[in-house]
Structure formats: structure tokens, C-alpha cells
Amino acid sequence: MNYRDKLNITADILTVVSRNAKKTQIMYQANLSYKVMTRYLNEVVSASLVSFEPEHQCYVLTAKGKRFQTAYLAYLKNRKRIEKRLDFVQRQRLLLEEMCRSRKTDRLAVEVTK
């Protein structure tokens, strides 16, 4: 099961709403329960990321919502780059720890494998 945090859920809702959507579309396309969708939809409306358009009976993305999407994509790109770098650093640490193992441990490992 893949856990989504608040930013991920908000971004998913804004992606759906960027194509102008009704509540049911938001709920299904963002893969949310009705209760969770209602809570988050209220939050994004109160944050002025999304607004309700009464004449079309749908939710639309605001200029602030578009800025959020742009900033969120930049965040994801940076996060991916940093996680990749962190993986590299962790592999380096493991190699260094391996080099620090005692020679006695190395000899025991060789003897066990014989």
C-alpha cells in the first residue's frame, strides 16, 4: 500500500481540478474516499487554490493553484535528486564500514566458507 501525505493528496486534487471537475470526478480520479475528498476540497478552497464555479457546477483551478502545481513539480524534482544523492552517500558509508571490519572477522569469514 502506498501512503500519500497531505501534499501528494493536494497535488492530486489540483491535477483533477485543472481540467474543471465535479466532486465525484475529484473523488474517483484522485482516488479518495468521500470523507477525505470533502475535507481536502474544503482546505484547498479555503486556501484559494481552487474555486467553485456555480454556473458550471464544477471546481476550477485558481492562479494560486497553478503556482502551487509549478512549485510542487519543482519540489518533486529536487526531492528525487536529493534522494538519489542520499542513496549514493549511504552506499559509500556501507563500503567504508566494510573496510573498517577487523581482519580477524575477515579470516573467520574465509575459514567458514572453506
Image: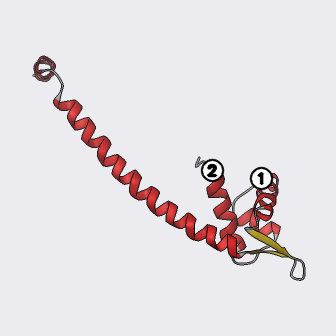
Q: Is residue 48 above or below residue 91?
A: below
Q: Residue at x 61, y 69 (%)?
A: 69
- Which residue is under mark 1? 36
Q: Is residue 99 above or below residue 55?
A: above
Left or right: where 91 falls relative to 30: left
Q: Residue at x 56, y 66 (%)?
A: 71
Residue type pointed to by label 2: Asp
Q: Is residue 66 above or below residue 84?
A: below
> Which quarter of the figure has residue 27?
bottom right
- Which residue is under mark 2? 5
Q: Residue at x 27, y 37 (%)?
A: 93
Q: Position of residue 32 (x, y in %)?
A: 73, 57
In the rendered structure, which disc, 2 or 1, sits on the residue that comes first in sequence? Answer: 2
Q: Position of residue 57 (x, y in %)?
A: 87, 77
Q: Is residue 110 above or below residue 80?
A: above
Marks 2 and 1 sit apart, C-alpha to C-alpha, by 12 Å
Residue type pointed to by label 1: Val
Most distant residue in the right direction:
55
The residue carrying pointer 2 sits among few (fewer than 14), some (14 to 19) or many (20 or more) residues within 10 Å by Cα, namely few
